[in-house]
Every structure is written in structure tokens, then in C-alpha cells.
Amino acid sequence: MIKLHKIQFVINPKSGVKRKLQLVDQLKRELKPEIQFAIHFTEGPGHATDLAKEAVKQGADAVVAVGGDGSVNEVGKALINTKVALGIIPMGSGNGFARHLKIPLKLDEAIERIMAFKTKTIDTASIDGQAFLATAGLGFDAQVGWKFANFGRRGFLSYMQVTTQEFFNFKPKTYHLEIDGERIETEAFLVNFANAGQYGNNAWIAPSASLSDGKLNVCILEQFPSHLAPDIIFKLFNKQIEKSKYYKVIQAKEIKVKQAEQYHMDGEPRRSLKEMTIKVVPRSLKVVV
């Protein structure tokens, strides 16, 4: 087993500042004396990636993202195809990637996982060369991602408020996809490209997705009658969405989308004015589990 000697913690202070300052004190108490460590707070978008890249240059064994899926994405993409492991202390709104990996949400238990330093190598994915770790998507979940990013408050209740508001305003769109060379046209409520299984908060958009099968799950949720919304939501939170007749999944290595417009990557909103290409990147990231 590889031992942990040098580690860097990257903390997103955007929310829960007091709790994260308590975490710093806890880390200083619990880290073993022989472990070299550094703790950095991010100062804006992209800073976590820069910090992680610098940690790679300095020979770190692991870089630990302290935050939500956006923070995990920023740190993780700097570690792809390196020997440096991604650690996660989940402190975000949804923590979808950490939940898929069954990383504890309790601080002390998450720290114990980091200290045990058991790792596995997983797949990642990319859109036009930009990496994501868990999910990316078009349609309704992209719309929610954009609205939530500008909502002003984080947390599960705020997310559900945005989701409910947007549900009654959202209009399905027609998407032109090329999935491993096969062209598909579909009118859909959402199209999701899943490496991991869930958005966060145990909402499973791709229950059968695997982080180590060398493929993405292309999840298409077709328009459904509004009175079935409670049933769809129930199925999402109970890992049963694949049983819905309005849902289909196609496994693929490469997908092209024409005129995607707005989309999200690990919950972070993006825009594209051209055809975009989504690819799986097999066995490209070492994570602490």
C-alpha cells in the first residue's frame, strides 16, 4: 500500500465558512506528524485548478477538494493522467460525486478515509477537451444549473425551490445527437451524459452508471405529462428512473451534439454555440475512496 506523505487541501470558502474554519482546526489536530500538508482557500473560479496543478509540480501524493461538485471538478481535472490522487471532503449542496463513491458526508469519517489513503483509478469525461467527473447535461437540468448559479443562496432547499419554479416554465427541445456514429433526433425534457450516477442529494439520473466501464450513460428523459412529475421525482430519488417508460439510456464512448446552447458540467453552467463533442476518458484519475 502506498503511504501518504504529502497532501494539499483546497477549500472553497463560498459557503459554510465557519464550518470550514473548524475543519482547518480539526485537520491540524488529526493529521499525523509525519505528513506534510498545506491548506489553501480558493479566491475565485479556476483558482482550485491552479492550486492543484501547483501541488502536482511539488510532488503531492493527494490533493483534497473541500466543497461541492464544482470544487471537486476544479481540483480533479488538474489531476487527470497524473499520479496524484483526488481526495474529497464533501461540503457542497449536493455532493453527487462523493455520494456515488460512498465517501462519508461526516467530517471526521471523511478525514479518516483520506488518512487511510486507499485509492482506485476511475474514468473521467470531457466536453470539447474540458474535463468533468460526474455528469453533464442539456435541457431541464442545464436550465436549473443556470438559475441555481444565480439564485443567491445555496443548499438543498434552495435547489428544490429553483427546480420547482423552472419545472412549470421549461419547454422541451429537439436535440440532434450522434452517439458512437449513430445519428439520433429526439425531443426531450433533458439529455444527460453520466459518468457517475447522480446529480447530488441522492437524485439518481443514471443508476446503472459505472466509473470504471470505459463508457458514459447517455440518459434521455422524454417529455412526460405534468401530472406524472411526482412519480418521476420519486423514481429519481429511489434509483428507479430507468423503469420509467419516458426514460431511455444508451451507453457510448463519444457523443456529438449540434447547437447545444446552454448545458452544465458537474452542475456548473456553460454555453456552446457550435457542435460539441463529449468523450469518456478511461482510467484517467486516481481517487481516494
Image: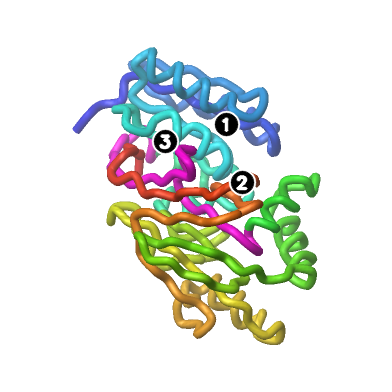
Which mark is first along the chain, 1 or 3?
A: 1
Q: Is residue 218 magenta?
A: no
Give neighbour class at mark 3: few <14, some 14-19, many 20+ (Cα, 10 Å).
many
* Residue 252 visible within the image: yes
The residue identified by callout 2 is 272
Q: Nearer the viewer, mark 1 or mark 2?
A: 2
Residue lying at 55% horizontally and 58% vertically, measured from the top left: 199
As drawn, the label of residue 138 is: none
Residue 149: horizontal and vertical position, in percent? 72, 46
For label 1, the SS is helix
Residue 132: horizontal and vertical position, in percent? 47, 44
Which mark is first along the chain, 2 or 3?
A: 3
Residue 168: horizontal and vertical position, in percent? 78, 72
As drawn, the label of residue 23 is: 1
| Region rendered in magenta | 113-141
As drawn, the label of residue 87 is: 3
Give the residue type at disc 3.
Answer: Gly
Q: Nearer the viewer, mark 3 or mark 1?
A: 3
Rendered image quadrant of residue 85: top left
